[in-house]
Every structure is written in C-alpha cells, then in structure tokens.
Image: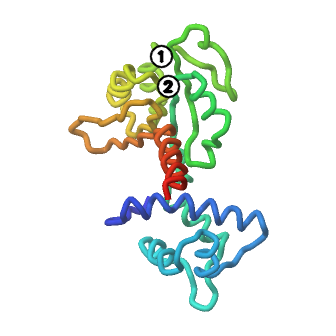
Amino acid sequence: MAKYEGVSKSVIQRLPRYRRYLKDLLNRGIHRISSGELAQLMKLTASQIRQDLNCFGGFGQQGYGYNVDALYEEIGNILGLERGLTAVLLGAGNLGMALVNYISFSEKGFQLIGIFEANEKLIGQTVHGLTIRSEKELEDFCNKYHPDVAILCLPREEVQRESDRLVNCGVRGFWNFSHYDLFMDHQDKNIVVNNVHLGDSLMTLCYQVNELDRT
C-alpha cells in the first residue's frame, strides 16, 4: 500500500466526499467529467480539486478531464478500501444496532466480524449473521481473529477501560461514539482515534438556525 507523505488531514477528509459524488455520477451513467464540472457539483473550486488530487499524483488529462470510473477506483485505493480491514463493535444498544443496520461496512473498507455486549438479555441474539457475544469473550476473540478497529458505542464510564483492553489485544483504530473524547495515552504511536459526537453537529445547527433570527 502506497504511503503518502505530507498530505493534510483536510485533504484526506475530502476524499470520501469525492468518492461519494463520483459514485453518484457512475449511477447516472456519466463516465467523464472536467474539474470545473465536478467543482460545480461539489461547490468547490476546480483549483481545489486539482490541488487535492495532485497530492496523490493527479488523475486528469488536459482537454479530457477525469475518467470517473478510474478516479473512483483510485480514490478507493488511496483510502485502502480494498484491504478489507476487520472491525468489532462494542455496545449492542440502539446506537450500535443503528450503525450495524444502516452502514455498509464492506463499502467503507471494513468487515464487521464481532459484536460484544455486557447486557445478558442481548447476548446470543443474531444481527446480520453475527451473534452478539459477551464482553467477557473479547480478549479470546481478539487474540484469535486480530481485528484492526473497534467501534465503541459504550457508556462514558466504560470507554477508557475497554479501549485499554483492546489496545492490549492489538487493536489499532477506534471509532468512538461515546460522550467521552477518547485520547490514547500510549507510547505506541500506531493508534488512531476518531471521536464522533452526533449531538455536537446538531447543536451547531441549532446555533446556525438561531443566527438567522439574530440578523
């Protein structure tokens, strides 16, 4: 897998958005597009798109534009979606099950291989072919299957403890949906955390709508 040096986080964060728009173009039967046309669709500038893609070598041809099929595939390769990283989910409550039911993990580069829960009433239930396991089985499962990433849908007070368990089992990435910002205080720098706060986004929207009434 190619290593890209010096690419900013903001550029990386735009790549999934590019891929989403390219997928929509393919679904509409469009296989060629200029940077200007793509910029108009995405409300960016053509210069921004060219600068972003040039971080990875550039994929357009002057006078032709972008081959949508090829660019869609290349962005997937840059993101590493074809590697099929494995993930486990901790917390089979409403939020955890919403993620399992509505996110296509395979299209996003992951295979969900295990679901773990402390609530005895949920253990043993089957969701999308996966049996919800007791959290007591976590170490044995991780030692056997070596998941790359953990999705945390846990109460605040459990997040740090469970993430420490997972790091000790070799998990390298965390998608954290708790109300707690997870910061990994480990010497090993090969750990990535993405804290997701849906409520923060909603409160930001609340402020923005209220601003309309203040002007």
Quadrant position of the N terminus in the picture: bottom left
Query: Nearer the N terminus, badge 2 or badge 1?
Result: 2
Helix, strand, or loop for circle 2? strand
Q: Which of 200 and 165 is in front in this view?
A: 200
Q: Nearer the viewer, residue 98 or 168?
A: 98
Q: Which residue is drawn at 66% across and 72% down?
A: 68
Residue 138: x, y in percent? 45, 20
Say if mark 2 contacts mark 1, CB within 8 Å: yes
Farthest residue to the right: give it: 29
Residue 135: x, y in percent? 47, 16
Q: Is residue 45 left or right of residue 104?
A: left
Q: What residue type is labelled 1?
A: Glu
Q: Is residue 169 left or right of residue 98?
A: left
Looking at the image, is 115 positioned above or below residue 106?
A: above
Q: Which residue is drawn at 73% across and 66% down?
A: 26
Q: Residue at x 54, y 64 (%)?
A: 75
How far is disc 2 from disc 1 in space, using C-alphas? 8 Å
The disc at residue 143 is none
Q: In this view, does 106 lie to the left or right of 201?
A: right
Q: How crowded is mark 2: few (under 14 residues within 10 Å), some or many (20 or more)?
A: many
Looking at the image, is 172 positioned above or below residue 128?
A: below
Farthest residue to the top: give it: 120
Q: How many labels does the image show?
A: 2
Helix, strand, or loop for circle 1? helix
Location of mark 1 (residue):
135
Location of mark 2 (residue):
90
Residue 116: x, y in percent? 52, 21
Quarter holding residue 140: top left
Residue 5: x, y in percent? 33, 65
